[in-house]
Amino acid sequence: MKNQEIAKMFYEISKFLEMDNVSFKPYAYQKAALTLETLKDDIGEIYRKGGLKALKEIPNIGENIAKKIKEVLTTGRLRYYEEFKKKMPIDLDEIVRVEGVGPIKAKVLYEKLGVANLRQLEEAARSGKIAPIAGFGEKTQANIIEAVEFLKRSHGRFLLGEILPVANEVADRLRALKEVKKIEIAGSLRRMKETIGDVDILITSDDPSRVMDVFTSQPGVVKIWGKGSTKSSVRMKEGFDMDLRVIPSRSYGAALQYFTGSKEHNIALRKIAMDRGLKLNEWGLFKGSHLIASETEEDIYRALGSSWIPPEIREGRGEIDAARDGTLPDLISVKDIRGDLHVHSNWDGGADSIWDIAQFAMKMGYDYVGISDHTRFLKIERGLDEKKIRERNGEIDRLNEKLKRSGRRFKILKGCEANIMTDGSIDIEDEVLAELDYVIAGVHSRVKMTRAAMTERICRAAMENPYVDILSHPTGRILKRRDEYEIDFDQILKAAQKTGTALEVNSYFERLDLNDVNILRAKKAGIRMCVNTDAHRADQMHQITFGIAQARRGWAEKKDIINAWPVEKMLASLR
DNA sequence: GCCGTTTTCGGCCCGACTGTTTTCAGTCG
């Protein structure tokens, strides 16, 4: 993933430049990084085909940045970046994650105290060395200690799947109050980002004081940071902070738009406002001092010549242009999903029987459910061998008969989640794979291999096995625990393209794999995807919400997601 | 460092808050 690597370098350069108080250049590098991150084609490929000229044709890549990309591609290094690193060998990315410390403070701390990483930052703060530095002080030092502690405890972010249920519960509690007129969760949670920093809730109310009382005294609040008539802020027992803001009814739409973000989206939108001689802020859209739009988000987007944009794609990845041109994607939604293809039964390590799973799937309104038990190699999950798979298939046949007799059109599909062994082979005989409706394959062992070996393992062997239809959790990352495998994702995309293999969007909240950016790349490459839950208990099938949210963030439409298709069409596409 | 229906220079998003100051720099969203 050369694009991602170079993007990361540019992000860091942007911070180094900010540190030196350089104006505007940081912005240029940031934009270049964002462009690279979401670029459809491999940057190396672009360079090979069209040289420097082709690089310069990419938006936000000019003369100088093109040359730097060329340098990375041809030498594997970037002197400009290395010089920054040499001058200031600090873990900038880690340090600026501490609330209240930005690039400029980081620089001072390095020069005065030699602080190069989080540990040293904490040490310096705890030994009282930070307070005496000009521009810092006691309060800043205490804040740094608290911020570092927080970061260590939580890595600074919370998982969407952990935080959304809590936030919804709070929102429901407030919604029930007669003093609350409108209420909405804003921020990255509304955008359904895979990880969330804190929660912003917006309300309108004629009598906020009682709402604030309820908010700050509700169960789960462990600390009240502040309580006023327009804003209250609390820490919840789960460790994240929640803000409640009371918004004047008239500017509700403007505030909702503003607090939903993302920052990049808002910057782009404000720019458009400016181009039209208008000004956009959290109070509304203004021409001079005259208010043009503010009550609803729709009003604001419309006044800027755009249709309303779903929060999930407000990430500054071209959504505003698309909205203006009328080419916004018709995003996939939960109700489009006809069935879940990745559910484990109690034949392997799952908790529930196939019949219970089917009942649950019917309750969810699905047309089918695919049982994809683990296979032989995965002993810890009681993986099924060929004989067991056949026995289980027999049970599925009997249950399908039963469904048919009772007049239900619901179908249980025979699948498995086979293991991709280190040499790329599949741990089940082809003969048995052929008897299944579909085959998922995934890596569950030896997750640390060289990039070349892991890429080949997944691509050449597994994807080209004629029976493998879907690749489960393709990049292998576990949020806050484990990075992606070392893989060349572009190669995986190519293999999927060539073989028609679908890539899974795994909805399990610690995986969310593919992630939003990779979904967008897969979509652009015309690759089919499949939003599954990997449920090990029937009720986990509800987690489809999280996968769908990521699919939406990756601009996926019904046509991109095979389990949004009628079952016959879906099955036909696999074989 | 990028960009251009303001096109090779002169712009580049904006406001609030915090902590440090005594008029503002840095950070955040």
Image: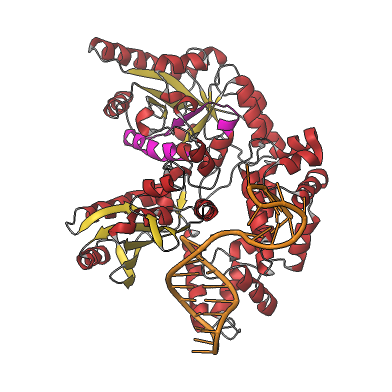
The residue positioned 59% from the left and 28% from the top of the image is A420
Left or right, A48 with reference to A178: right
Q: Quadrant of the N terminus of chain A?
A: top right
Image-quadrant location for residue A534 = top left
The residue positioned 67% from the left and 55% from the top of the image is A28
Residue A191 visible in the current orientation: no
Give the image location of residue A273, x and y in percent: 50, 53
Residue A511 visible in the current orientation: yes
Magenta-span inclusion, residue A545: yes
The residue positioned 76% from the left and 47% from the top of the image is A66
Give the image location of residue A228, x and y in percent: 29, 72
| Residue segment shown in magenta | A522-550
Magenta-span inclusion, residue A33: no
Left or right, A474 with reference to A247: right
| Front residue of this view, candidates B29 and A489 | B29
Left or right, A92 with reference to A137: right
| Front residue of this view, candidates A108 and A307 | A307
